[in-house]
Amino acid sequence: MSSASAAVPAHASRSPSLKGRVRVPGDKSISHRALILGLLAVGETRIEGLLEGDDVLATARACEALGAGVVRLGEGSWRVRGVGVGGLASPAAPLDFGNAGTGSRLMMGVVAGHPIEATFDGDASLRSRPMRRILDPLERMGATVVSCAEGGRLPLTLRGAERALPVEYESPVPSAQVKSAVLLAGLNAPGQTVVLEREATRDHTERMLRAFGAEVSVEPWGAHGRRVALSGEPELSAVDVIVPADPSSAAFPLVAALVAPGSEVTLEGVMTNPLRSGLLTTLLEMGADIRLENAREEGGEEVADLLVRGGRLSGVDVPPERAPSMIDEYPILAVAAAYATGETRMRGLHELRVKESDRLAAVHAGLIACGVEARIEGDDLVVVGHGRVPGGGPAIATHLDHRIAMSFLVMGLGAERPVAVDDAAMIATSFPAFGPLMRELGAEIHLEAGA
């Protein structure tokens, strides 16, 4: 198990207008998948722009433990020499994923489709997160849970199928992780593996599988969903992958620029995949001054430069069907809503209760601590903005959640009094350069050494 790191308190103060042009780190979802498909491909996969946060590095180590040759060539530049579908070896030691929910769940799908056994573990936060939604379809495909903590949690030992079975699986929750785990397990199964999702979730796995040579079809299913079908037992071939800038990381300087009056910030090469653009859509509805420039394609994904200017925002109603396209961005949207005028209602946030923390409760508590009017009604978060945030008060409890930490540090940039968080150390899991990048733009964010 990962050793617990010491807490690193941090605070942010009201800042002058933010100015500059920056590129946030590579997309975490793409980074995980590039390493995993590099493991499963034949040949040498070159990856540029890989996010070198703790979560992704844990996946890189797991790929190496399963038989891949993984080499860092330079900043963001990596080489993975794969073993091919069916060529994995049982790891000699437990796979420690730290805080990486995506890495651990996707890798469970990989292991489930192969006749090997692996133990999965992580930090206290990852050990508390539910895995049963992943394990249910994998057991239907022939995998066996040898041992696990109560409720199907980590530490967990999974024995893959001797001969993986194709399934048609209707996911009970809109989850790209569940879908991806089933498809990755289906790579080593004969015939066709099908995932039915009632609401379309991020499609990076489907896109990247095609790029590596798999046959994947996607068709509409139901009112808002899709039928995703994978033809099993392909020979995946290594490709070069360029990782676009992460829209979930870009969300923090983006909202910071919106709440610091007079700001003008350009965020370069941000992924604008429609299934990841819910926050952008919502902020534009709120009246945000955001302009997409130089739209292009990189690594099979749509990207653009985002020119963001500070200005007034208005409250809006965010429909529940938008949640899959912005599930990681609700904490920072709540910050934008606090600075808006009027009521913003974010509907259908049940999935936030099972992220790195109970994000719904944590965001609500943080808003109240900053003097913002907010309430939870069922699975909805309602924020009543008055165009200003008092700030101050005790340090916000982050619950080992990097997005809570970054969101409330952004909150402090426009608040009347500084906003502190109890721990910023875990920001390194997804955005190691958060502090320096924000300070480069002029933000008054102070993290102690090592954050």
Image: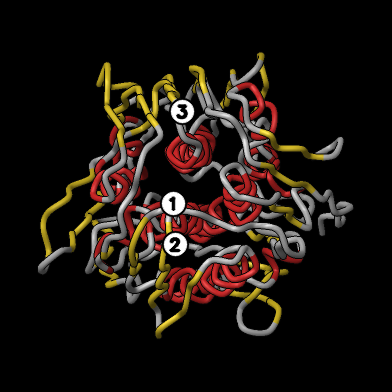
Assess whether mark 1 and mark 3 are in contact (beta carbons under 8 angstroms). Answer: no
Q: Which residue is mark 1?
A: 336
Q: Nearer the viewer, residue 9 or 414?
A: 414
Assess whether mark 2 and mark 1 are in contact (beta carbons under 8 angstroms). Answer: no
What number is the disc on residue 163?
2
| Residue in the picture at 35% in, 36% down | 208
| Residue in the picture at 70% in, 65% down | 399
The quadrant in which the C terminus is found is top right
What number is the disc on residue 433?
none
Disc 1 residue type (three-letter):
Ala
- What colour scheme does the image use? secondary structure
Element assignment for label 1: helix
Q: CA distance from mark 3 to mark 1?
A: 15 Å
Compared to residue 392, the image places residue 87 above or below, namely: above
Compared to residue 4, the image places residue 298 above or below, namely: above
Q: Which residue is mark 3?
A: 263
Disc 2 residue type (three-letter):
Arg
| Residue 196 visible from this viewpoint | no
Element assignment for label 2: loop
Q: Nearer the viewer, residue 24 or 261?
A: 261
Compared to residue 139, the image places residue 269 above or below, namely: above
Picture coordinates of residue 262, whole percent (x, y): 45, 28
Drawn side of residue 3 relative to residue 100, left or right: right
Picture coordinates of residue 183, whole percent (x, y): 36, 54
Element assignment for label 3: loop
Q: CA distance from mark 1 to mark 2?
A: 50 Å
| Residue 135 visible from this viewpoint | yes
Callout 1 environment at 10 Å: few (<14), some (14 to 19), or many (20+)? many
Assess whether mark 2 and mark 3 are in contact (beta carbons under 8 angstroms). Answer: no
Drawn side of residue 339 relative to residue 226, left or right: right
Picture coordinates of residue 284, whole percent (x, y): 26, 44
Name the N-terminal-most of marks 3 and 2. 2
